[in-house]
């Protein structure tokens, strides 16, 4: 207890010191700092010494995290350029501090669950980037990342159909003015009725203890059929996917997890690619609810890679929103409903690795093992809310129930349809676009933005050609650094990209230099074009002004002549000239003035 008291005392002292420092810094404006540096050598020297001391502290703290470091921080400006590195290290430090505090206060005496310790440290390098051949090289289909035709549903048959497959393949306007196919199960999803039990209170069924069974690995057609036979007997199944978006341009569904009340299945979607459409017998069966969490991407990934569609989805993310939970993640639901502490670091793992390491298989299994129990508990909580009022986007209020809203949101989500990614050069949105990089790295300067756009356009083309993720070719942080620094030689480019890029890009240093040069030249050309247009507009305005001036002078002369004729040797002519109306000749002047106008 004495240690805790001492810790609280230290924390109070640090808080007070930090508050005083922030208040003092706020009183000293940036311009004042520049002024004092210019007028006081002592001030400048002390500021430089403080900066050097802070940089040294940053380097010391960084090294304590265990996070790989590009290089030591040498200059204060690097703290801005390499902010993403600092953020990563800071997050790691805070997580370690959190664990130590929990351990000290006894809030979490044992940080392990089951047989694996759920360490919050970063993943082992070999789990993040597997040194394996690209699975897509073994696919029977040809990968074409330059295809400009709409993505066509992979379906070869349509189980549980209301509308035939042929009549379901309808083209409609899609994103960026391109055509797209609607979801071929749109009618079935709209007309499907959820089983009645979904809207009734239930006694939650506890999940089977993890230690009492092993997951079933599905990697051949025989095991698919065996699993399908079991799934067909269920009224609800839990589904999740693990995805790799690093070593493929559009990404790869690398693993599927399906859980029933008694079994957990891990399906090798890489080995079985092209053989899993048979699962549509279950996935489109309206009598079987498919429970997923945050299925916005999963729904379209299933369509894109496996030709699988979902009818009667229940997305627990919408339930979290309707119940006003502070957090909406699956990790939070596991903790809230199951008192299960998981670690989402494995989201960053390379799920293409085979054989799948035991710790990764354990994590994957946990994502669906508890989900049906959460489904039970969440439905009860939603039903306990009774009738609620909701307001739609048009401001119309209506009475409904929480469970009805979740089902409607899930139904709409299931109707999504996959489209090929399009590089949005104009607005920079979407996969590999420049907008998020510009915002994150505050790249708004004209030349920097020109280079950024040129680099992201080039990266997109290289990623498509090599079937690699844009972040694998060159991560966003390095794209941002290249755009800001605009190196003009090979050494400058290599200094930025050498730490975290693909080997193939290291052979493209000259290309990157050319892209930077072209980006600058294009920017200059655009500036020149705008300048020319501006000059032409200015010249036109000047000509118009000269014409107007001549016209005004002629009008004045006509007024003067008329005034002289109407009011000879009178001051009234002067009044008329400036628009004043002498009382004795008001009617005459108004008539003349009106005719002039």
Image (cartoon, rainbow, N blue to C red):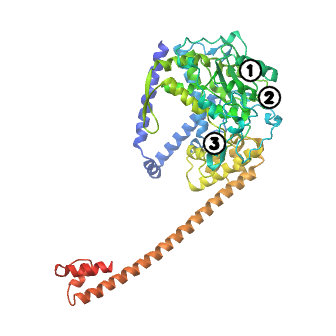
Judge depth for marks 1 and 2 and give the one in front.
1
Disc 3 versus disc 2: distance between alpha carbons?
34 Å
Residue drawn 77% across the image and 18% down it: 226
> Foreground residue, 346 or 112?
346
Residue 122 in view = no
Up the image or down, 169 lies above or below 240; here it is below
Q: Residue furthest left?
A: 584
Disc 3: which residue: 477
Going by the image, does 82 lie left or right of 126? left
| Secondary structure beneath label 3 | helix
Label at residue 271: 2
Can you identify the residue that label 1 sits on? 228
Element assignment for label 2: loop
Quote the CA–CA distance across marks 1 and 2.
Answer: 17 Å
Q: Quadrant of residue 21?
A: top left
Sequence-wise first label, 1 or 3: 1
157 relative to 552 in the view: left or right: right
Quadrant for residue 268, please give it.
top right
Q: Nearer the viewer, mark 1 or mark 3?
A: 1
Mark 1 touching mark 2, by CB under 8 A? Answer: no
């Amino acid at each position: 207890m004495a240690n805790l008291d001492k810790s609280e005392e230290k924390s109070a002292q640090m808080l007070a010191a930090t508050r005083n420092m922030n208040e003092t810094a706020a009183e000293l404006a940036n311009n004042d700092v520049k002024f004092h540096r210019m007028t006081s050598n002592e001030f400048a020297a002390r500021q430089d010494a403080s900066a050097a001391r802070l940089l040294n502290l940053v380097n010391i703290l960084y090294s304590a995290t265990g996070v790989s470091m590009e290089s030591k921080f040498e200059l204060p400006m690097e703290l801005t350029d390499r902010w993403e590195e600092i953020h990563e290290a800071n997050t790691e430090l805070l997580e370690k501090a959190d664990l130590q505090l929990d351990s000290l206060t006894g809030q979490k005496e044992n940080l392990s669950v089951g047989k694996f310790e759920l360490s919050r440290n970063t993943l082992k390098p070999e789990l993040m980037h597997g040194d394996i051949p690209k699975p897509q090289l073994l696919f029977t289909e040809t990968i074409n990342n330059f295809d400009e035709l709409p993505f066509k549903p992979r379906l070869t048959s349509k189980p549980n159909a209301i509308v035939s497959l042929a009549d379901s393949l309808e083209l409609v306007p899609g994103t960026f003015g391109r055509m797209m196919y609607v979801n071929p199960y749109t009618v079935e999803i709209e007309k499907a009725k959820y089983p009645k039990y979904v809207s009734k209170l239930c006694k939650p069924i506890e999940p089977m203890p993890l230690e009492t069974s092993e997951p079933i690995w599905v990697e051949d057609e025989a095991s698919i059929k065996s699993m399908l036979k079991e799934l067909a007997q269920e009224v609800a199944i839990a589904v999740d996917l693990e995805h790799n978006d690093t070593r493929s341009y559009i990404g790869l569904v690398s693993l599927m997890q399906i859980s029933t009340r008694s079994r957990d299945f891990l399906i090798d979607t890489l080995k079985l690619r092209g053989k899993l459409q048979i699962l549509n017998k279950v996935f489109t069966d309206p009598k079987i609810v498919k429970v997923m969490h945050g299925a916005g991407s999963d729904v379209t990934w299933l369509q894109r890679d496996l030709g699988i569609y979902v009818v009667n989805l229940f997305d627990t993310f919408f339930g979290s929103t309707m119940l006003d939970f502070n957090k909406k993640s699956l990790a939070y639901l596991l903790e809230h409903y199951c008192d299960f502490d998981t670690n989402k670091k494995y989201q960053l793992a390379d799920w293409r690795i085979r054989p799948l390491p035991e710790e990764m298989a354990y994590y994957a299994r946990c994502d669906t093992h508890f989900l049906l129990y959460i489904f039970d508990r969440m439905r009860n909580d939603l039903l306990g809310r009774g009738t609620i009022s909701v307001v739609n986007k048009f401001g119309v209020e209506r009475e409904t129930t929480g469970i009805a809203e979740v089902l409607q949101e899930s139904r709409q989500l299931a109707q999504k349809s996959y489209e090929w990614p399009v590089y949005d050069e104009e607005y920079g949105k979407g996969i590999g676009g420049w907008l998020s990089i510009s915002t994150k790295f505050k790249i708004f300067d004209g030349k920097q933005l020109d280079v950024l756009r040129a680099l992201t356009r080039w990266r997109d083309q290289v990623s498509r050609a090599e079937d690699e993720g844009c972040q694998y070719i060159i991560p966003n942080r390095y794209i941002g650094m290249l755009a800001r620094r605009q190196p003009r030689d090979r050494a400058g480019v290599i200094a930025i990209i050498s730490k975290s890029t693909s080997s193939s890009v290291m052979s493209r240093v000259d290309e990157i230099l050319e892209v930077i040069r072209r980006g600058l030249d294009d920017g200059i050309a655009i500036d020149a074009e705008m300048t020319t247009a501006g000059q032409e507009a200015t010249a036109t305005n000047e000509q118009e002004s000269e014409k107007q001036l001549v016209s005004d002078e002629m009008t004045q002369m006509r007024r003067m002549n008329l005034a002289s004729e109407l009011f000879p040797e009178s001051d009234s002519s002067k009044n008329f000239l400036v628009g004043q109306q002498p009382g004795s000749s008001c009617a005459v002047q108004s008539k003349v003035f009106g005719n002039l106008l």
